[in-house]
Image: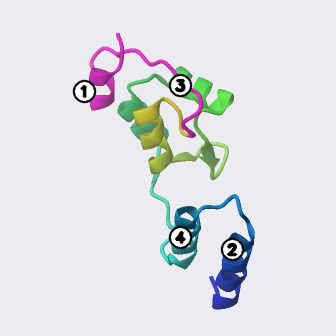
Amino acid sequence: MTATTINAIQTLLKADATVSEEQAANILSCCKQTNFRRRLINAREVMELLCISRPTLRFYVRKGYLQQINFSSRKARFDADEVQRFANNGSSTGTNSVPRKNTPGCESSVCSTSEK
């Protein structure tokens, strides 16, 4: 991001009374970052991490619990950070909790901590 853009964002943040100083500092630090690459994982890795089946993964995508990034009709990936937040909170956004049950044979730590 250019210095001009960062200065404009800083001016807007100062003018907005609803934004705390800590929030403004976090926003500006994100604007100054240069590495924006996301780590993408495939459906199989998501299913192993969450201990779910493919139909359940499709259900989570359809309901909006997870966002699927489509590269083609046969190639889709998921943001690893979003999946990890979902695994920890039950939701990628932290708002809707989704119950998960143990899947037989799954060795993930998520399965061992979720309800049976």
Q: Residue at x 61, y 41 (%)?
A: 67
Q: Residue at x 73, y 66 (%)?
A: 16
C-alpha distance separating marks 3 and 2: 34 Å
C-alpha distance separating marks 4 and 2: 11 Å
Q: Judge from the rendering whether residue 41 lies leftward or rightward of residue 73; answer left or right.
A: left
Three-letter amino acid code at the position of disc 1: Glu
Secondary structure at numbered mark 2? helix
Q: Which residues are magenta?
A: 93-116
Q: Which mark is residue 107?
A: 1
Q: Residue furthest top?
A: 116
Percent of width and height locating residue 44: 43, 36
Q: Earlier in the sequence, mark 4 or mark 1?
A: 4
Three-letter amino acid code at the position of disc 4: Ala
Q: Which mark is residue 14?
A: 2
Three-letter amino acid code at the position of disc 2: Lys
Query: Is 24 inside the magenta-drawn segment?
Result: no
Q: Earlier in the sequence, mark 1 or mark 3?
A: 3
Which quarter of the figure has residue 64? top right
Percent of width and height locating residue 83: 47, 41
Q: Which residue is label 3 attached to?
A: 97
- Magenta: main secondary structure: loop
Secondary structure at numbered mark 3? loop
Image depth: mark 4 or mark 2 in front: 2
Q: Which residue is label 4 attached to?
A: 25
Query: Is 95 inside the magenta-drawn segment?
Result: yes
Dot 1, crowdedness within 10 Å: few (<14), some or many (≥20)? few
Q: Residue furthest front?
A: 17
